[in-house]
Amino acid sequence: MYSAEEMYRQLMEKSSLDPEFRRKLTDDPRGVMQQEFGIEIPEDVDIHVHQSDMNTIHLSVPAAELAEEQLEAIAAGRCCCCW
């Protein structure tokens, strides 16, 4: 199993080197994550891919309250949305 950090790093590296992969990740992030990591993300989980530029910064903050399973997943270094 990949940690969230490993998945993020792999997606960022591959998308910076491969324009076709970047397009696929933007168009179908759920499908790309399934193909790359063998994980199925539930349909009720939204995935947003944002492309940064010199004038835009994207920040992601955790929910105000996390469920016990999410806290355990984060503590174990796993993505909190992929169990």
Image: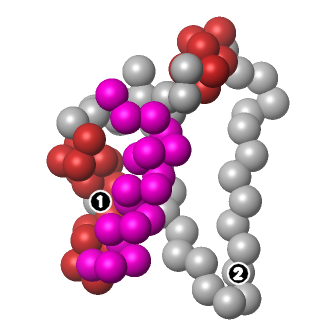
Residue 82 drawn at (x, y percent):
42, 29
Residue type at mark 2: give it: Thr
Residue at (27, 33) in percent of width and height: 39
Q: Is residue 17 magenta?
A: yes
User: Which residue is situated farthest in the top direction here?
Assistant: 68
Residue type at mark 1: give it: Asp
User: Which residue is situated farthest in the right direction here?
Assistant: 64
Q: In the picture provided, is 54 more to the left or to the right than 14?
A: right
Looking at the image, how many numbered discs can be counted on the residues? 2
Residue 4 drawn at (x, y percent):
49, 39
User: Under tag 1, what secondary structure?
Assistant: loop
On residue 28, which mark appears? 1
Residue at (73, 34) in percent of width and height: 63
Disc 2 marks which residue? 56
Q: Whole-Å distance between the Cαs marked 1 and 2?
A: 22 Å
Quadrant (top left, top right, bottom left, bottom right) of the C terminus: top left
Residue at (33, 28) in percent of width and height: 1
Residue at (55, 28) in percent of width and height: 77
Q: Is residue 9 visible?
A: yes
Residue 42 sits above or below residue 71 on the image: below
* Residue range corresponding to the magenta coloring: 1-18
Q: How is the image coloured?
A: secondary structure
Q: In the picture provided, is 74 more to the left or to the right than 33?
A: right
The residue nearer to you, when weighing 82 against 14, is 14
Q: Is residue 26 magenta?
A: no
Q: Residues within 10 Å of mark 1 (few under 14, many from 20)?
A: some
Query: Which quadrant of the figure has residue 65?
Result: top right
Q: Residues within 10 Å of mark 2 (few under 14, many from 20)?
A: few
